[in-house]
Image (cartoon, rainbow, N blue to C red):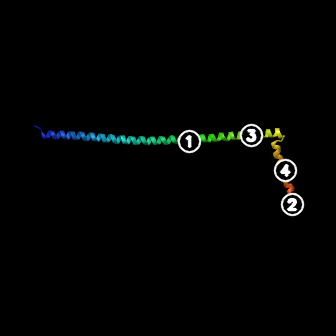
Amino acid sequence: MINPAKVINNIKSVTDMGETSLKTAVWAGLGAYSKGIEQVGMAQHLAVKRFSGLVEKGQEVETETLKRFKTTQSAIVSRAESEFNRGLNMTCGIDRDRLTDFEAKVDRLQQAVEKLAKEHK
């Protein structure tokens, strides 16, 4: 015959075992969720840190590139002026420095002529 006390104890035992298993499963799920949130936070921090590093490196490269560009530009302009002056001197016999000097003298002469013209009016 079935003993009701034994059946009740068996039901309580199964219920307790089920409750413990359920709690364990819920705790495992909560633990996994918490760990995932931590890892996402760490990944975001790492991504921001690496992105900032890339930005800094990009700024350094930009600065270096602009410096090289300006240096190259100055060298090209200097060389072009030098070649132009050499070509001008060889074809026309005019030295650019002397030409600049000559222009300044012409400007001074023009001012003197204008001054004299005003005095004679």
Give the percent coordinates (x, y) of residue 96. Answer: 81, 43
Residue 103 position (above or below residue 57): below
> Earlier along the polypeptide chain: callout 1 or callout 3?
1
Which is nearer the eye, 33 or 93?
A: 93
Q: Can you identify the residue that label 2 sits on?
A: 118
Residue, x 14% and y 40% (percent of image)? 5
Give the mark toward the camera: 1 or 4: 4
Secondary structure, mark 3, is helix
Residue 71 position (above or below residue 118): above
> Earlier along the polypeptide chain: callout 1 or callout 4?
1
Give residue 9's quadrant in the image: top left
Neighbour tally class for label 2: few under 14, some 14-19, many 20 plus, Cα within 10 Å: few
Determine contact: label 1, label 4, CB under 8 Å. Answer: no
Q: Name, please, the residue furthest toward the front.
A: 91
Q: Is residue 41 left or right of residue 70?
A: left
Residue, x 83% and y 46% (percent of image)? 101
Separation of marks 2 and 4 at Cα, in angstroms:
18 Å
Q: Can you identify the residue that label 3 sits on?
A: 80
Which is nearer the eye, 57 or 91?
A: 91
Mark 4 belongs to which amino acid? Val
Mark 2 belongs to which amino acid? Lys
Residue 56 circle label: 1
Secondary structure, mark 1, is helix
Mark 3 belongs to which amino acid? Ala
Give the percent coordinates (x, y) of residue 114. Answer: 85, 57
> Earlier along the polypeptide chain: callout 4 or callout 3?
3
Separation of marks 1 and 4 at Cα, in angstroms:
55 Å
> Earlier along the polypeptide chain: callout 2 or callout 1?
1
Give the percent coordinates (x, y) of residue 22. Answer: 27, 41
Q: Can you identify the residue that label 4 sits on?
A: 106
